[in-house]
Image: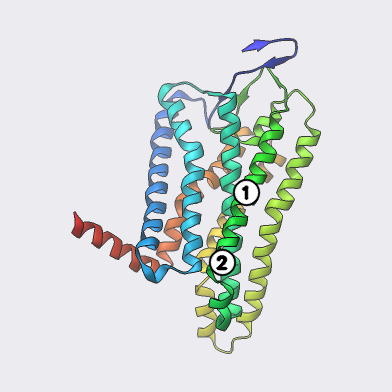
């Protein structure tokens, strides 16, 4: 690392993690390793069960399998590097590796955001226009929604990450986090970050606000339609088809909002890092349980998958 005056040409950052207490490092290693393995195994089972059961080859489960892949990817972008750093007792991450990690986190978080909006639209069509469901949610539209989700997520991630390349950094390269979250990286810059902050808020409004508005619109229409149903049983049945999705949406946006609020109102990096762990580690782990425990079709598909695997072995 070479220093000039007040600024430095840096080759690496330091990921300070959730705590610097050496006695807690083995506990954190075991905890995050367990969470990561559960995340990968749970989401992988969801993907395999959907692909193996022809009865689940519907738009809703197609989006769910892609959501599970995004969950695996966002956890794989952050947790393995954290585990390696704890195991080797080395907090460093290269400059390129840090920006790449920030880019991947933005990419997969954005993809999950867009997929949740696509799933909300699917539930809106299924409940509000049931007779036209197969016509509206045709394979071409589902493919288009997936393609738009991927392209918008890539555009958002590349835009913000490439802008970060223009920043100059000081000698203090310690990131009080367990992964390179872009907001934390920008805080270390010595150069003017006004444009970067404006661009970050603008990107959040466009790439985050539009899918979220789509979710709000879909559920506003769903609630209005369900409320008109004459029987309580009919209302319960309609709501039960989107209950799991509502829980996942609440977790995703609730933890994301928690990160924003904690970084805005508190000076404690530990609280911000803990909030980030919720959306990048805990939420992806919980999603398979939410969809499998609350969905009878998914539970049956998982049972058939496990029985088929056991008989094959």
For label 1, the crowd category at 10 Å Cα-Cα, with few meaning under 14, some 14 to 19 and many 20 or more, is many
> How far apart are labels 2 and 1 at the CA level?
20 Å
**Mark before the other along the chain sequence, 2 or 1:** 2
Task: Tell me if 305 is positioned left or right of 109 in this view.
Answer: left
Residue 98: name its quadrant. top right
| Residue behind mark 1 | 153
| Residue behind mark 2 | 140
Report x, y in % for residue 213.
70, 62
Report x, y in % for residue 207.
69, 51
The residue lying toward the viewer, choosing from 300 and 54, is: 54
Report x, y in % for residue 306.
27, 59
Residue 126: name its quadrant. bottom right
Q: Residue at horizontal 76%, vertical 46%?
A: 202
- Element under disc 2: helix
For label 2, the crowd category at 10 Å Cα-Cα, with few meaning under 14, some 14 to 19 and many 20 or more, is few
Q: What is the tally of numbered marks visible in this picture?
A: 2
Q: Residue at horizontal 66%, vertical 42%?
A: 262
Quarter of the picture containing the N terminus is: top right
Task: Examine the rendered structure and indicate whether residue 201 appears above or below residue 287.
Answer: above
Q: Which is in the foreground here, disc 2 or disc 1? A: 2
Task: Examine the rendered structure and indicate whether residue 237 appears above or below residue 59.
Answer: below
The residue lying toward the viewer, choosing from 56 and 12, is: 56
Whether residue 72 appears in this view of the structure is: yes
Report x, y in % for residue 29.
41, 33
The residue lying toward the viewer, choosing from 202 and 53, is: 53
């Amino acid at each position: 690392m070479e220093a000039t005056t007040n600024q430095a040409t840096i080759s690496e950052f330091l990921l300070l993690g959730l705590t610097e207490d050496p006695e807690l490092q083995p506990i954190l290693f075991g905890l995050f390793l367990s969470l990561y393995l559960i995340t990968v195994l749970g989401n992988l089972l969801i993907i395999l069960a959907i692909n193996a059961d022809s009865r689940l080859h519907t738009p809703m489960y197609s989006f769910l399998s892609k959501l599970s892949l995004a969950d695996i990817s966002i956890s794989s972008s952050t947790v393995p590097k954290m585990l390696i750093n704890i195991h080797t007792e080395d907090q460093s991450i290269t400059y390129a590796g840090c920006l790449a990690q920030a880019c991947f986190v933005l990419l997969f978080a954005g993809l999950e955001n867009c997929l949740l909006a696509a799933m909300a639209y699917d539930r809106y069509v299924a409940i509000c226009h049931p007779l036209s469901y197969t016509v509206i949610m045709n394979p071409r539209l589902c493919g288009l929604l997936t393609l738009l989700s991927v392209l918008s997520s890539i555009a958002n991630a590349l835009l913000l990450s490439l802008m970060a390349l223009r920043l100059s950094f000081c000698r203090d390269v310690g990131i009080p986090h367990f992964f390179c979250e872009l907001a934390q990286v920008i805080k270390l810059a010595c150069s003017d970050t006004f444009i970067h902050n404006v661009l970050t808020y603008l990107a959040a409004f466009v790439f985050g606000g539009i899918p979220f508005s789509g979710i709000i619109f879909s559920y506003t229409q769903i609630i209005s339609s369900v409320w008109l149903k004459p029987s309580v049983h009919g209302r319960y049945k309609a709501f039960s088809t989107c209950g799991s999705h509502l829980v996942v949406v609440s977790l995703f946006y609730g933890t994301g909002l928690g990160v924003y609020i904690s970084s805005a109102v508190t000076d404690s990096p530990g609280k911000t890092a803990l909030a980030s762990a919720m959306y990048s580690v805990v939420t992806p782990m919980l999603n398979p349980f939410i969809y499998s425990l609350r969905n009878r079709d998914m539970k049956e598909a998982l049972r058939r998958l496990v029985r088929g695997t056991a008989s094959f072995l």
